[in-house]
Amino acid sequence: MSTQNILEKHAPERHNILMILHDLQDHHPQNYLTEEALEATARYLKLTKASVYGVAGYYTMFSLKPRGRHIIRVCVSAVCELKKSESVIAHLESTLGIKTGQTTPCGLFTLELSECIGQCHEAPSMMIGQAVYNNLDAERIREVIESIRNQG
Amino acid sequence: MIKETRIVLKNIGKINPESIDDYIAAGGYKGLRKALSMDPLSIIDEMTEAGLRGRGGAGFSTGMKKKFTSQGCLECPQRYVVVNADEGEPGTFKDRVIMEQDPHLYIEGTIIAGYSIQATKGFIYIRAEYYASIDKTRKAIKAAYEKGFLGSNILGSGFDFDLEIKLGAGSYLCGEELTMLESLEGKRGNPRIKPPFPAEKGVFGMPTLVNNVETLANVPHIVLNGKDWYRQFGTERSPGTKVFTISGQVRLPGHYEIGLGVTLRQLIDDLAGGMLPGKTFKAALLGGAAGTFVDASMLDEKMTYDNLREKGATLGSGAVIVLAEGDSVYDVLLNCLRFFRHESCGKCVPCRVGTSLLVRETENLKNVAAGKALLDRMVRESEIMAATSLCPLGQSPILPLESAARYFESELVSG
């Protein structure tokens, strides 16, 4: 879907900007907002580029840099930390061969951290894309990553 | 041995959340039918007399909030309802459970709230990470339109109400009601100066009622069954039930609904199955990061808004994070303070600087000889932040910090 087609799904009103930015980012194979997308949004909403950039830069779910096809978000909030989220991060880093904040060279995964994702009863938890994974241990992490790798 | 009293969680696990017919068969939308036959003001009076208090954390009277909004800016052409579904307080997942498993309940409550203040439009502001909540809510709204519970001339009453989902994008601060309004308008999530309160000047400058998901989920039940029925649960000043989300070192972590006035010991032992085998209770963090630590001396205190406040604790969102002997209060406190540093928007200098400073000082606490003096200084700094920040974020670090210092000073300073 072209940038223009995505924009036109939403009324050209400022209050739709977060919905538009989500839509643009979700449709980009590298999960980010390109400069071209931000400029097109500014034109569409009749806002300055600076104010669109200001909004995109404020909210942590938006990325202004290319990322992997699948965004892994490891919850590092209090309960998950209590349930050893640091070993979840360590397992992911070694399985993927990258550090937190990086993208795998194949472009499949980006490893990020997240505040509470509301899965505290089954901590430690992470999200990959839209899916939630709970009660994580080394084996479960390896299974999940392998199954996504096999799907490509 | 106490048991749960389920009002807002009544249908959880019993109906298909994607079937409006299931919801109707379980008594759903009866509250709306009754409300539409009532005078809007009498619905507000019913809420006030039922004593329902905001379940997002602040505990303000829902009825009073509605009354102020219905009377705010009478010359304004439009009024709005905003549903605060931006659940992000660490340890809290009550709204997610309602949205994922019984979305029609809070949608029904929202329509009734709209009618009671004569609003014709509502926004549900859901955090974007809650994909399942968004999906279930979207389907429920569509089904409600098809059945004539949303749209124009609802059930032939002449009342029109539209409902639209808006997504957040990863900002905890946007769960604060004035900041949420900024975000809804398409701006950066910086808080507004108040007054004016949303009841007078909310989203797009119009009077706006901002209510939490759990609060709204109570509304259909109160309309249908009345204030006296509602007041049989809970206590005189904290009526009704509350959904607690219990996590940490307990056998059965999860969501539990029970009348306010329950004790922490009952929550842990009777509902959450007690401590994990081999674990002994050490502390609980009540209300999440913007909450307070308690130790075992508080286990038998009644969990109500007022009693906990009098004892220097908070009920907040209903999060109960249970720590055992061997767990580090210091680590959990540092986690909370890092969270505030990450989420501070930077608008107010005391919060922007203070949230960073508190993290650095906490990291140093164990390395300095005069740990006690540093801890006292940190508490004073958090008091200054609370007094000089615009919104609850800068006002929150004092809660876990001061309570941790009160109960666990020796652990914090000696390492």
Image (cartoon, coloured by chain):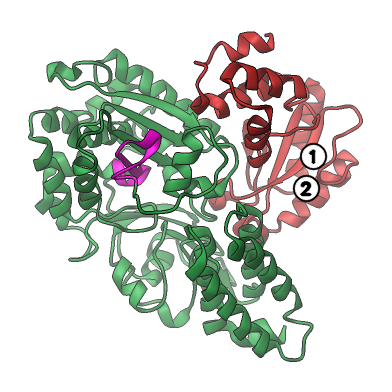
In this structure image, what is the colour of chain B? green
**Which residue is depicted at the point 31% across and 27% down?**
B121
How many residues crowd around disc 2 within 10 Å: few (fewer than 14), some, or many (20 or more)? few
Q: Which residue is mark 2?
A: A138
- Residue B207 highlighted magenta (yes or no): yes
At 62% from the left and 69% from the top, the residue drawn is: B333
The kind of residue on which mark 1 rests is Arg
Tell me the subunit letter for badge 2: A
What residue is disc 1 on?
A: A142
- Provide the chain ID for the residue under circle 1: A
SS at badge 1? helix
Which of the 4 quarters of the picture holds residue B263? bottom left
The residues colored magenta run B198-216
Q: Is residue B325 magenta?
A: no
Where B119 sits versus B250, above or below?
Answer: above
Q: Residue at x 57, y 40 (%)?
A: B188
Expressed as whole percent of the image width and height from the top left, the position of residue B90 reads 55, 55
Image-based side of A9 in relation to B149, left or right = right
